[in-house]
Image (tube, rainbow, N blue to C red):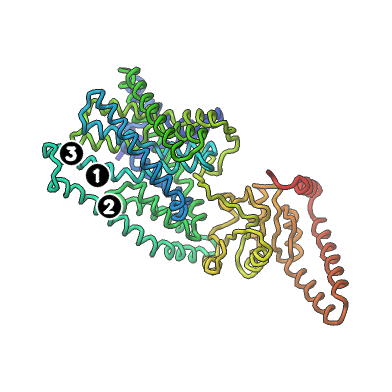
Amino acid sequence: MADAHGGGDYKDLVVFLAAAGVVVPLFNRWKISPVLGFLAAGVLLGPDGLGRFADVVPWLSWLTIDDADQLAQLSELGVAFLLFMIGLELSWERLKAMRRLVFGFGLMQVVLCSAVLAGGFILLGQPLAGSAVLGMGLALSSTAVVLPVMAERNRMKGAVGRTTFAALLAQDLAVAPILITVTVLATLAISGGDVQPGVLGPALLTLAPAAIGLGLLVMFGRLALRPLFRSVAKSRSRSGGGRQELFVALCLLIVVGAGVAAQAAGLSMSLGALVAGLLLAETEYRREIEVNIEPFKGLLLGVFFVGVGIGLDLDAVAANPLGVFGLALAIIAIKVGLIFGLARLWGVGARSAIETALVLGPAGEFAFVILNTGMVEGLASPAFTQSVLVSATISMFAVPLMAMLGQRLAGAPANSVPLAGDPALGLGPVRDVGMVDAAVLIVGFGRVGRLVAEMLKEHGQSFIAVDTDPAAVAAGRRDGYDVSYGDAARSEMLSLCGIDTIKALVVTMDAPTKVDDVVIAARALRDDLIVIARARDDRHAARLYGLGVTDAVPETTEASLQLAENTLVDLGVPMGLVLASIHERRDKYRAVFQAAIPEARRNRKTRALRAGPRP
């Protein structure tokens, strides 16, 4: 059914996509955070922006988003996709290694900030239960805003990234207990405030479905996720690398399904997506999943930021600007002071602690969930809570500015090279401390690739491998090799495999066109990388040299040289003379192949190799 503007049911979605394609690139050109671009677009395109002039200028209705609720579910998916990607980068082992920060610093930050903020609201004349709800809601920060902003500024690696992420993860884990606490407080208020087992028991039992649901989700993931992805990967392998849509569909199913299952158990959708990511982090499909999910995450997070901008009540701000901005500043200042002290107490350096405190100071998206629940339960004053929510929204707008201030105070250089991700949105993948540090990337892990891996291992060279054959990947992982499933002809996959830091790329696949595609993708990302590729024959080797490989190894030529070497040795010719002649003939072949390279390409290649690897 068409809406009043004749734009159909998808008019608001079209307006959002136009904002993503116009407003955000402009902010990128001005070197302003894309997150601020989406937030500003939400304010501009919302009912309180251009929408308030639609009655005077009717055509403006085509440029505004009338129904924010229409985008709400998509924005919730954006947060879920973000947490899913974080889970893929974490793994259970890394989470265990971070337990001191997550369950120590992170949870203590939630408790202390909740208590101090609640005390402040009590001093402002709010009742105890309502103050507790307000304090718990505002103690949380915005995972959806903080992590993309920090990833954009390349601050997720190192002490700042670990500390910030630990606090945000603890906050996400605390959402369900906080909501249960709000229910308990409402139950106590109804019973006159008496703490009785008969009253508390039923309320505390609401924890049981959450615990059971989380356990079932983990059990199902352990048993079913790897076989599901293996089945789809085999289907792609049989179709010659096609059926990409099946893999994408399965990725979307896992994220959305895990989120819905968590919601059914009384947990947040984002927490369910995080658990799904953690379960898939140790599988061979992690990198391929990241490549397929990243574009959806960027767009859906953009919907979230636009929704936050739309939710800013400009009339409330205009009615009491000093009160709104003053409360936002007070919330940020209190949280920054407390988080800085706690971070120092947990051994975080002063510069990292101040940067962490500044980005975590503003309120977060879960404040809306908790405070609205408090109003529904009758614990929080609707009028006062609405004014607090406006201040919370204002504080979220300050996150990119706080990140910039924190980075300058920490003395860290500004990041001039954006992280790999959606170039239109500027929202790169969130990377944790476990970056790839291998020296060699092997593409193709059949018989040839495995032999290369064995020789590298024998000589103490670190490596990772990637292959599109799920059977070869599974066999390699059973033997203890770091092999991942994925298509290395995609630049996104090469980036996730550490193309920026590896020393050499070895392409061992037996399909000439696939070898060419990988070499082209790798050379587009790095001119100085050592690239050794397997060639089908002499003509293919010449073509590979033209594409910029350091060395091409033609199967037919090498087989001939090996046969000649064995024959001469068996006939009694001294081994030294045989090896010298073999190497001389190999050099002659290489010279013939390289003669096919255009002069300009050869000069460029020589200059890049002489320059050595990038720092």
Query: Distance from label 3 to label 2 (Cα)?
Result: 19 Å
Q: Which residue is mark 1?
A: 180
The answer to whether one can see residue 561 in this image is yes
Q: Which residue is mark 2?
A: 210
| Between discs 3 and 2, the one toward the N terminus | 3
Residue 186 is marked as 3
Q: Relative to the observer, which residue lies in front, 317 or 573?
A: 573
How many numbered callouts?
Answer: 3
Residue 258 horizontal/vertical position (percent): 35, 53
* In this picture, residue 50 sits left or right of residue 282: left
The answer to which quarter of the image holds residue 179 is top left
Q: Relative to the observer, which residue lies in front, 101 or 202?
A: 101
Query: Distance from label 3 to label 1 (Cα)?
Result: 10 Å
The answer to which quarter of the image holds residue 488 is bottom right
Residue 526 horizontal/vertical position (percent): 67, 47
Give, as a three-letter code, the residue at label 1.
Ile
The answer to whether one can see residue 249 in this image is no
Considering the image in quadrants, where does the N terminus appear?
A: top left
Residue 129 horizontal/vertical position (percent): 21, 33
State the residue at coordinates (63%, 58%): 462
Considering the image in quadrants, where does the C terminus appear?
A: top right
Crowdedness near tag 1: few (<14), some (14–19) or many (≥20) residues, C-alpha within 10 Å: some
Crowdedness near tag 3: few (<14), some (14–19) or many (≥20) residues, C-alpha within 10 Å: many
Give, as a three-letter code, the residue at label 2.
Ala
State the residue at coordinates (24%, 44%): 180
Q: Are marks 3 and 2 in contact (CB under 8 Å)?
A: no
State the residue at coordinates (77%, 69%): 557
Crowdedness near tag 2: few (<14), some (14–19) or many (≥20) residues, C-alpha within 10 Å: many
Q: Relative to the observer, which residue lies in front, 99 or 20?
A: 99
Q: Are marks 2 and 1 in contact (CB under 8 Å)?
A: yes
* In this picture, residue 109 sits left or right of residue 439: left
